[in-house]
Image (spheres, rainbow, N blue to C red):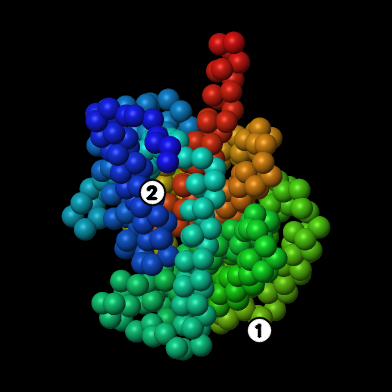
Amino acid sequence: MEKGPYLPDFLKGELALTIKTETISTRMMQFLYFSILISPWLPPIALLGTGIMALFSLRGKFPIKGWPETVFLGFIFLSIISWFFNVSWFLSIPVVVFPVVLFGLYYLLAVWIKHLKWTWKKIEGLYIQFLFLGIYSAVVTILQRIGWIPSYKADWTIFLGYYPLLQSQSIRSVGFTTNSNLTAAILVCLALISIYAMSVLDGKWKRAGALGLFFLFGVAIWCTGSRGAWVGLIVGLLVQVWMTGNRRRTVGILFGLLLLGIAAYINRNLIPRSETLVSTAKVRLFVWEKAFEIFQDNWLVGVLPLHFGEVFEQYTGEYLYHAHNILLGVAAEYGIFGLIIFTALIFITLVRARRWRKMAVEKKEKRLAGMLSSLLVAMMGHGMYDYPIISPQVGILFMLSIIFIHAQYEQKCLSLRQSESRG
């Protein structure tokens, strides 16, 4: 029997420590993803855990330049400036604390993920695991619609997100996020991941199962009664068409879903909600008009999240948490500079995703770039009708897509350019 190469004891210790650190990092990342599907209260805890791990593992290596790190630091700076112009409190806590902590944790998450230097195959495995755990989320949403899962107020229903905390009681399923639109946003992402899984899983039965999951998530989205979710799903599929080679199957699904989405928009009976499209549109237009007025009056520094509701109440006499539109929400909450750096982040991320896809050799890696881009675009498409990323449960999933795209781009493209310049 051949023996492996001899390693000194100190090298064995370092190797064991490296393996242990990688295992802990993997488990922490899995917990971060899985927490999104389990409870609306777990993702902030998981994000805090990754932040603490980053502080200890990075040992003071915190870059200021880079995408998306600079953007997150920019939002921290804008939040502090905005609060000095609009001093406000939430639960006796300065409002500025919430965005500063949140973007600070996003910054640490980005630096930590880049430090891990995961291969695309490891990212692929993480999203496939996320997809199959998502079956729980779809089943909960569907069973809640038919009345098999309670939505009454109790500690355990609030913890699991079954009770509608952020909306009134209705026939719409709130799923596992306490809100129908937030649940729909996550289900859209799961549906897009299932389309991706159809092209990367080996074996006909696995691919057929992924297709079945797509329709399962589609039924669950219908149960939420969200109209904006269908818009997000359609534009997300458009991106998958744009960035994958197997276009016929995706185009067929796209046109079928497009017809279903149009029918759902114009026919009240096809979607489980009491409001008609016209009545919902009137409310949205009113909210967007007032949000734009808030932006016009606070265009330089914004009014910050949470404080937006108080300002909206001053304008209308009614309290509303957010602007029901991502771009209007960012503009009203962080001002013109916040809107500029946010739109720049989205644009640069999609450009880098396309370049990463071109640099990738294997087809599965190319489709991973397309899938992550589709998640980003889908949540932006849904965000034209709502503001789901303001919730950590959806926002973390949104930011993870952005961070992984930039991390893989830098590993593939920037490292290659640096090696060519040295050569």
Residue 121 appears left or right of 66: right
Does residue 418 appear anywhere in the picture?
yes
| Residue 32 image point, x, y percent | 38, 54
Please name the residue that numbered disc 1 is placed on.
269
Q: How many labels does the image show?
A: 2
| Residue 376 image point, x, y percent | 56, 49
Q: Dot 1 surroundings within 10 Å: few (below 14), some, or many (20 or more)?
A: few
Position above or below: 138 against 60: below
Q: Distance between the residues labelled 2 and 1?
A: 45 Å
**From the image, which quarter does the N terminus lie in?**
top left
| Residue 331 image point, x, y percent | 48, 44
**From the image, which quarter does the C terminus lie in?**
top right
Question: 365 and 310: which one is in front?
Answer: 365
Question: 192 and 392: which one is in front?
Answer: 192
In the image, what residue occupies the spot 74% across and 65% down? 253
- Mark 2 vs mark 1: in front: 2
Please name the residue that numbered disc 2 is placed on.
26
Residue furthest to the bottom in view is: 147
Residue furthest to the left in view is: 92
Position above or below: 385 against 243: below
Q: Dot 2 surroundings within 10 Å: few (below 14), some, or many (20 or more)?
A: some
Does residue 86 appear anywhere in the picture?
no
Give the secondary structure at mark 2: helix
Marks 2 & 1, CB-CB < 8 Å contact? no
Amino acid type, label 1: Asn
